[in-house]
Amino acid sequence: MQQYEINYENIFVLIIRFNSLRILLALTARFEWIIHLMNAQNIYLNFKLDKVVYIKISERVKHLSNQVCKLLKSIYELKQSANLWNKKIIKMLKSIEFKSTLADISVFTHSCEIIIALYVDDMLILVKNLKKIEWVKNEIKKMYIMKNLEAVSKILEIHMTHQSDRFIKIDQDYYIQQVLVEFDMKHMKKALILLSLSINLKDQKFRILNIKDHEIFRCLIRRLMFMTVVTRINIAFTVNHLSQYLSESQEIHLQVTKHALYYLVDTTNLDILYEKITDESLAIYTDAVYMNACKFKSTTDYCVLIFNSSVI
């Protein structure tokens, strides 16, 4: 058993922020950059540990009751493994003169106009010409076993369609289908409206969810929040509203959450599009409600467009 502050302290690993990813995709579409994907193989294995770690011996191996094993190298399911990989890849990128950006430390830039974005064991490489991308790949392969996936079709549960001279399009259709299967909702009917104005989520007449249904409700909200953050900003208001009932959820809240998922199935054609356009403007829209009449709370939200495409 690994205990916090006894066996490990930091399990941090670099994962690109979704805002950063969308900005990079907008830039790639606008300036016709080349974007490739590489995957590091067996990143959690065989790194030298920076701490002394002992593990229990398997019951299938003969040993005395007071004996344990001392780990010499990292293995899967070890808390420190991800952080060890994180330290190694940062050191390697800095050795070939990459620098992390101030806005997102998982995004690295090079003076030769090369950008690398990290998310755990995968890395996106963005460049203007093919020669530079081959140089980067060769430098990385000298230190790690890498799988060269080249053209990108999937990033962090996001499906991506890339026409190099036209556009980049991202959607989460496949992820939505996975969620439907996970919660046995594959064959349910679709919904044309996200949230009816006639539904009162504060009504106390509905049954309080049991432990099992409450956990289903919480899991569905997590999935919907992920979709909201990544590509489906059109459901942000509904998901935010439903998440206010996580502590005391009722039957109506679970029904509306499932209904929101059916709505997503009926609108799988919605996506975020990044195009090559000459308009280089930056636009910020905000929708603020000050001193809400019901709860006397101020709320606000905003949307940022670069090259007429949503990035934040």
Image: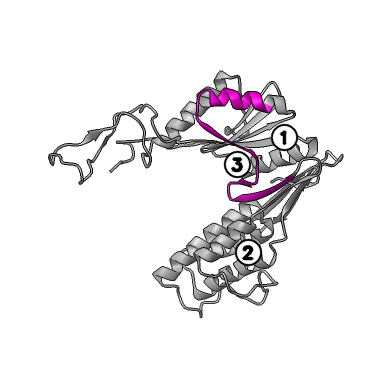
Magenta segment boundaries in residue numbering: 133-162
* Pair 3/2: label in front: 3
Name which of mark 1 and mark 3 comes first in the sequence.
Answer: 3
Q: Residue furthest right?
A: 278
Residue 185 position (above or below residue 177): below
**In the rendering, at what x and y percent does residue 12 appear?**
46, 37
Residue located beneath label 2 in the image? 238
Kindly report the distance in space between the C-alpha atoms of the residues bearing marks 1 and 2: 37 Å
Q: Nearer the viewer, mark 1 or mark 2?
A: 1
Who's the residue at 47% across and 78% down the image?
207
Residue in the image at 82% along x and 41% along y: 276
Say which quarter of the image contains residue 96.
Answer: top right
Q: Which residue is mark 3?
A: 17
173 horizontally vs 43: left or right: right
Residue that mark 1 sits on:
34
Please tell me which of labels 1 and 2 falls first in the chain.
Answer: 1
The image shows residue 6 at horizontal and vertical percentages of 29, 36
Residue plotted at (54% across, 62% down) = 179
Q: Is residue 136 above or below residue 36?
A: above
- Element carrying mark 2: helix
Could you tell me residue 189's position as x and y percent?
Answer: 62, 75
| Residue 139 drawn at (x, y percent) | 58, 22
